[in-house]
Amino acid sequence: MKRGRRSGQAPDHITVVDARATKRSIQGTAIGNFMEAYDFTLFSLVATILAQKFYPGENSEAGNLIATFGTMTAGFVVRPLGGFIFGPLGDRIGRKPVLVMTISLMAVCASVTGVLPVYHTIGVWAPILLTVVRICQGLSSGGEYAGAMTYIAEHAPDHKRGMLGGFLPVGTLAGFVVGAALVTALQTALSTSDMLAWGWRVPFLLAAPLGLIALYLRSRIEESPDYEEMRAAREPTSGRKQFVQTVVRQWKPLLICMGVELAVTDTSYMVSGYVPTYLKKTASVGDRAALVMVLIVLAVLTVGVLFVAMLSDRVGVKPLMWTGCGLLIAVSLPAFTLMRFGGAYPTKFAGVLLVGLPMLFLSSLEPVILPALFPTNVRYGAVSIGFNIAVSAFGGTTPLIAETLVAGTKNPMMPAYMLMFAGVIGAVTLIFAPEVAGRPLLGSGPSVENPAEAGDLMRQRGSGGGSGGTPTEGADVGALPGGAGRTQPGAFDVSGGG
């Protein structure tokens, strides 16, 4: 039995992945997700301080806060541009070199934030420089997470793609947790005046050594086997032709990608980026207590997402994501009601926990479903474009939109309505998405964990009319349309051809 590309071209080889290379791929990609989430969390949680330091003192507190969220939003607005730059580049020159570029730029931007002069020192240039740094950070983010999802998906065995992809949201949530914990610790250890004067700079400066660690881990990863195989078989492609292949011919899966991502990103950025502000301004919770509540919820989610990701390999991706969308619709109003009206802190915390629950079923499966929507030759570019358009429009803008809606309508429940809308869009979009659990990626042959599984699959192929075969380590395969395939370094490859 042969499984291959939807276009009708069916690669006849089976790849047995190299466990060591896969382990390095997880380490090298998850650290980038950690860095991105860490930076976003710091900016969000010290937003009230940044509003005082980088904007004129004569403005209102709400006006400065909205301006600060607007600066953060500027970084998200340019993310699609970063996706258009780094994504197709990753399809042309390889996944690894582009991922090295993005992590380097991201670490520099986070570190520079910690040394920027403030408004009192250089006047209007302070918010301008802060905005420029956030824009550069947004460009790097445009190629980071999409590249990590693509890279992990191409390194994973088909029946473990959910579990291995689950390490990416673990990295993301760990970045949220560490960032929140560090800010909480600083607010506990320092006086308010010290935190305002210099304490807020410390966590940004720590991004420098973190960036060096991330760069080291990423330099040790190997190129994606699917990309190596595709590069060996393809002919040189012009930039215009690649754009047509990535955007024009993939418009349906791009729409699915954006619809699914709307639900995922709106939820995650609401919890990590806006709920702390909501608790302080609307629910009258102190800074430290608000951070601790969100920190505990994110820590719980960090453990939980991996179990949901593992479960998807057994029961499928779509049923679990539908569960997450249904929870968004069902629990958002009760969650914000508890946060707003709950008298005691445990009641308010229950609201935070409730609003974070859908993330278990959405963030955990994002790295599984999105790369599986596209074929290898355009996967990095298409995921980057679809993912970043959604994140730019519905994710990074979430704190700004939520704060603006609450201030403009005087209705503190507007964030709940935003999440419910996201749940409806996500649920409807999933109707048109394929089930991807346990199936080969588009344009690739089956990927298995060990030679025994490869032998079983070859016997199935033989009984289905194909020819049998035995695994051979490091073999090149000439059964691919357009030329020979390549194995993952140190991997086995089995040809189904005669």
Image (spheres, grey):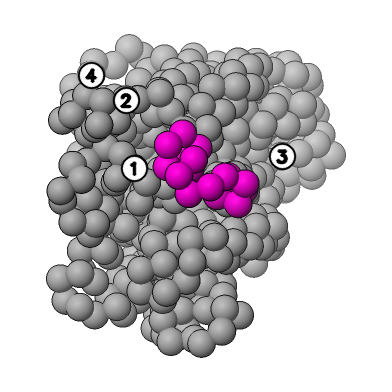
Residue wearing tag 2: 117
Residue wearing tag 1: 50
SS under mark 4: helix
Residue bounds of the magenta highlight: 185-200
Q: Nearer the viewer, residue 64 or 10?
A: 64
Q: Residue at x 69, y 57 (%)?
A: 303
Distance between the alpha carbons at the discs numbered 2 and 4: 40 Å
Dots 2 and 3: beta carbons under 8 Å?
no
Q: Could you tell which of marks 1 and 4 lies nearer the N-terminus?
A: 1
Q: Nearer the viewer, mark 3 or mark 4?
A: 4
SS under mark 1: helix
Q: As shown in the figure, which amino acid type bears the numbered disc 1?
A: Leu
Look at the picture and state if 478 lies above or below 349. above
Q: Could you tell which of marks 3 and 4 lies nearer the N-terminus?
A: 4
Q: Position of residue 229 (x, y in %)?
A: 53, 21
Dots 1 and 3: beta carbons under 8 Å?
no
Q: Nearer the viewer, mark 2 or mark 3?
A: 2
Q: Position of residue 114 (x, y in %)?
A: 43, 28
Q: Nearer the viewer, residue 311 or 245?
A: 311
